[in-house]
Image (cartoon, rainbow, N blue to C red):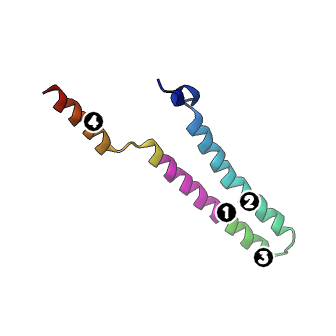
Amino acid sequence: MSNFQQNNPWFRSAMLFYGKTTGWIIVPLVAALLLGKKVEGFMFFIILMAAFGITCYGIYREIDQYKKDLVRPESDSDTRSEKINNGKQ
């Protein structure tokens, strides 16, 4: 077992994903609320909708990146199995 695997708990990637998505939720909405205190009326809702759009984009981006990190390329595993089979013959 490598040193990286010993020091890297199994839940680390899930916790990083949780932290990033939570950040994408909190930061834009809190910024919109703080900015909304300085404006009045309909402009507040426009700022809030823009923050919601930024939140949706950020969460989508993090999910897409997380899925790419979880999926291993099949070509790499095929190459390994071919090398093993060729070595036995």
Q: In the rendering, at what x and y percent does residue 58 appear? A: 60, 58
The quarter holding residue 56 reads bottom right
Lateral position of residue 31 relative to residue 85, left or right: right
Q: Is residue 63 magenta?
A: yes
Residue 74, label in figure: none
Label 2 and label 4: CA atoms lie apart by 47 Å
- Residue that extends furthest to the top in the rendered view of this protein: 1
Mark 2–mark 1 CB contact (< 8 Å): yes
Pick the front one: 84 or 23: 84
Crowding at label 3, few (<14), some or many (≥20) Cα neighbours within 10 Å? Answer: few
Residue type highlighted by circle 2: Leu
Pick the front one: 32 or 70: 70
Name the residue carrying label 3: 42
Name the residue carrying label 4: 80
Residue 52, label in figure: 1
Name the residue carrying label 2: 29
Residue type highlighted by circle 3: Phe
- Is residue 10 placed above or below 76 in the rendered structure? above
Lateral position of residue 71 relative to residue 9, left or right: left
Label 4 and label 1: CA atoms lie apart by 45 Å
Mark 2–mark 4 CB contact (< 8 Å): no
Q: Residue at x 78, y 58 (%)?
A: 30
Residues rendered magenta in the picture: 53-67
